[in-house]
Image (spheres, rainbow, N blue to C red):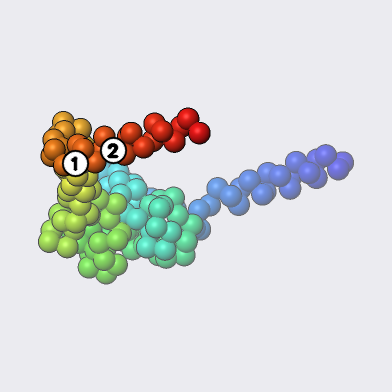
């Protein structure tokens, strides 16, 4: 009897986990081809747009309340027949470019797109300059003047005498 009760409780708990936000996104208006296209567009945009709260999750994967709201808004826009770019523009206007996983290239995002390449080039140039300076330092042997040579010989001579003590 207890095992039957445990099985029933387990089944009911599994059913509640199957509902993501209490709303199924079904497209039933129009012909099957149109509904399938809308469903694919909805799925594509839900995976392409980022949750404003979660940062590293898309709308399809996020359980945040705002992600549920955005999914419902996305559903309504797709259901009304809006194009993908119109929906993306709406989301960007409302939530900023943060909702895009791949920001659009414009004056505000040049640093994001080209910054890493520029930093890599600067690092390579610095490395080349350091290696050249070290190589030049090894190749250049400075000639001593006669006075410096005599002083060096005198110092070396003193060192030899000190070793025998």
Where does label 2 land, which residue?
A: 154
Quick one: SS at disc 1? helix
Q: How many marks?
A: 2
Does 125 sit above or below residue 102?
above
Q: Is residue 90 visible?
A: yes
Local crowd size for mark 2, using a 10 Å CA cut-off: few (<14), some (14–19), many (≥20): few
The one of 108 and 48 positioned closer to us in this rendering: 108
Q: Is residue 31 visible?
A: no
The one of 141 and 121 positioned closer to us in this rendering: 141
Q: Position of residue 159 (x, y in %)?
A: 38, 35
Does 74 sit above or below residue 145?
below
Identify the mark nearer the N-term, 1 or 2. Answer: 1
Local crowd size for mark 1, using a 10 Å CA cut-off: few (<14), some (14–19), many (≥20): few
Q: Position of residue 70 (x, y in %)?
A: 36, 62
Quick one: SS at disc 2? helix
Q: Position of residue 78 (x, y in %)?
A: 27, 55
The answer to whether 36 appears left or right of 82 in the picture is right
Give the number of the disc on residue 148.
1
For the N terminus, the image quarter is top right
The answer to whether 93 appears left or right of 57 in the picture is left
């Amino acid at each position: 009897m207890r095992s039957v009760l445990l099985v029933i409780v387990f089944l009911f708990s599994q059913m509640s986990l199957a509902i993501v936000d209490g709303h199924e996104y079904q497209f039933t208006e129009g012909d099957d081809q149109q509904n399938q296209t809308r469903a694919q567009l909805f799925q594509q945009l839900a995976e392409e747009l980022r949750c404003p709260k979660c940062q590293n999750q898309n709308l399809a994967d996020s359980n945040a309340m705002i992600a549920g709201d955005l999914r419902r808004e996305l559903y309504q826009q797709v259901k009304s027949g809006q194009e993908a770019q119109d929906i993306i523009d709406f989301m960007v206007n409302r939530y900023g470019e943060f909702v895009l996983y791949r920001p659009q290239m414009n004056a505000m995002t040049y640093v994001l797109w080209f910054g890493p390449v520029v930093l890599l080039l600067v690092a390579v140039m610095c490395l080349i300059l350091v290696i050249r300076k070290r190589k030049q330092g090894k190749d250049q042997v400075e000639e001593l003047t006669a006075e410096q040579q005599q002083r060096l010989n005198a110092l070396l001579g003193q060192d030899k005498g000190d070793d025998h003590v």
